[in-house]
Image (tube, rainbow, N blue to C red):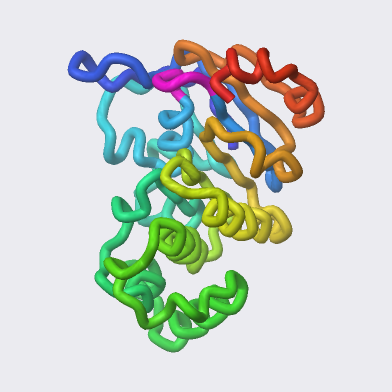
Amino acid sequence: IDFQNVSFSYGEESSGGGIRNVNLTINTGEFVLLTGESGCGKTTITRLVNGLVPHYYEGNLEGDVLLDGKSVSDTPLYDLAAMVGSVFQNPKSQFFNVDTDSELAFACENLGYPQEDILKRIDRTVSDYHIEDLMGRSVFALSGGEKQKIACASSSVLLPGIMVLDEPSSNLDMSATKDLRRMIQIWKQQGKTVIIAEHRLYYLKELIDRVVYLKDGKIEKDYSALDALKLSVTQQAKMGL
């Protein structure tokens, strides 16, 4: 993933959240934490990777974001969907169906995969993430943590090489956060590139390779995980961690 002199603003109606002159390279298989105070631009970076900017959120975009050499701006969202899986803060915002089985099938159906292939992918995903007890359920009957599990699983069915998460733990309790960590750990073990915008550090400590700290839309610091974890509690608090 390569950000080349990227700037983005959402326009006059929305103040904050944009980025300015960002140059950032994330290598295949790296696990990168984006952090900083609210409005620093970390969510915008995730949207530039999965294509929501500029294909869904309009604004002023300069520079280029490349995934394996392909420009995100020039790649249709349906092609990006097979390359980048996304998990949002509120899983309900990414559900398209009322039951869990249909939710896992949705992405493959949307891209016209054969039925036999879809069923194989669902079986493998259910097995990989140990969510047998969540199948055949109404999404309205799931807890917040269970909804986030389904969101993670449904984002994985297409086997994307990149996973992008935007504050996925913000509505979860301690137990559900541990479950989320287990799912994210599977992606790391599979060699996926993981980018997570997050304030909470404790559940990611052993997973992250880098911490990119943003301030006012710019990259202020790019730490190795070791250096980030050496920061004092006071320094971490100042960074919004």
Pick out the residue farthest to the bottom.
Answer: 116
Q: In the rendered view, does 106 fall on the left or right side of 177?
A: left
> Measured from the top left, where is residue 166 in percent x and y?
46, 40
> Measured from the top left, where is residue 75 in percent x and y?
40, 45
The magenta-colored residue range is 36-41
The prevailing secondary structure element of the residues shown in magenta is loop
Pick out the residue farthest to the front.
Answer: 174
Q: In the rendered view, does 198 fall on the left or right side of 201?
A: left
Q: Taking 79 as reference, is 169 above or below it?
A: above
> Measured from the top left, where is residue 116 in percent x and y?
44, 88
| Front position in the image: 213 or 133 | 133
Number of numbered markers: 0
Q: In the rendered view, does 85 fall on the left or right side of 95?
A: right
The residue at the point 56 percent across, 49 percent down is: 174
The residue at the point 44 percent across, 80 percent down is: 118
| Front position in the image: 160 or 220 | 220
Q: Quadrant of the C terminus?
A: top right
Q: State the image quarter where residue 17 is shown.
A: top left
Q: In the rendered view, does 223 fall on the left or right side of 159?
A: right
Is residue 162 covered in magenta? no
Is residue 40 covered in magenta? yes
The residue at the point 74 percent across, 37 percent down is: 209
The residue at the point 69 percent across, 45 percent down is: 28
Q: Taking 224 as reference, is 30 above or below it?
A: below
Q: Taking 72 as reference, is 237 above or below it?
A: above
Q: State the image quarter where residue 221 is shown.
A: top right
Q: In which quarter of the image is the N terminus?
A: top right
